[in-house]
Amino acid sequence: VESTLGEGSIFHFTAPLSPVNSLPAAPISPLSKSKLNKLDLTVLVAEDNSVNRKIIGSQLGQLGCRFTMAVDGEEALNVLQGTVTPDVILMDCHMPKLDGWETTKRIRRWASESNPIRRKISSLPVVALTAAALPEERNRCMEAGMNEFISKPVKLAELMRVLQTYSIDRNRAETDDDNNSRTKSLPILSPSNRKEAASSVQNNETTSDDPS
């Protein structure tokens, strides 16, 4: 101990420490394969960053989704008018040429056009992708006509949660269409035909009960 009146004191001590090369990495707990749902969706990804496209493409593959990539809003609009209509659009907000907000607004305006393909596309769900998770950013996405919001970097669990909703909706719609087509295929019997059908059933039952 070194002490000087009116100035203060200096303390010296020795502590035994073991050398450490590096700090242990924090444990990472990704979703196990058993928890991944195969969504079977067709997804259009509009994203200008090549690294983000690669990551999102890998995540969609893990979720059993087919996908097409567009590097900006203009390319996304061209892809949408192609031969395959996606089930969901993942839309980056900040893109060159045409950003995600304006792209979504143009898609929604297609609802008033006479082209049936554009009218169908106008109602597709659009999920915003943005690194800015501020409330005003979220509000701007909703005002542009987007349905959902995912913050970057995109996490696999969050992507699965959002896309799963649209997978369920699509499966429900396909089931309703299948039930409607089956209902339409059933023959409509007139009153006289109903009597003939009932008589035929009774005769068949009588014949089957005959011991001979």
Image: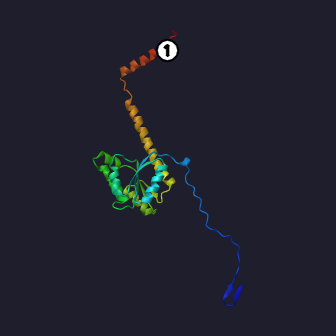
Q: 122 or 13: which is nearer to us? A: 13
Which residue occupies the extreme top position in the image? 212
Q: Is residue 17 left or right of residue 32?
A: right
Inspect this view and state whether residue 69 appears: yes
Task: Tell me the quarter of the picture where residue 50 sits.
Answer: bottom left
Find residue 121 and report its horizontal and vertical position in percent: 35, 48
Q: Is residue 110 left or right of residue 54?
A: left
Which residue occupies the extreme right position in the image? 1
170 up-or-down from 103: above or below: above
In percent of the image, x 49 and y 51: which residue is there?
Answer: 160
Find residue 165 and report its horizontal and vertical position in percent: 46, 48
20 up-or-down from 37: above or below: below
Find residue 76 and report its horizontal and vertical position in percent: 35, 54
Find residue 204 and report its horizontal and vertical position in percent: 45, 16
Inspect this view and state whether residue 105 appears: no
Labels in figure, total: 1
Q: Is residue 178 left or right of residue 32?
A: left
Q: Is residue 187 left or right of residue 154?
A: left
Q: Quadrant of the N terminus?
A: bottom right
145 up-or-down from 40: above or below: below
The residue where tag 1 is placed is 208
| Label 1 Cα neighbours within 10 Å, binned few <14 / some 14-19 / many ≥20 | few
Q: Amino acid at mark 1?
A: Ser
Which residue occupies the extreme bottom position in the image? 5
In percent of the image, x 45 and y 55: which residue is there?
Answer: 56
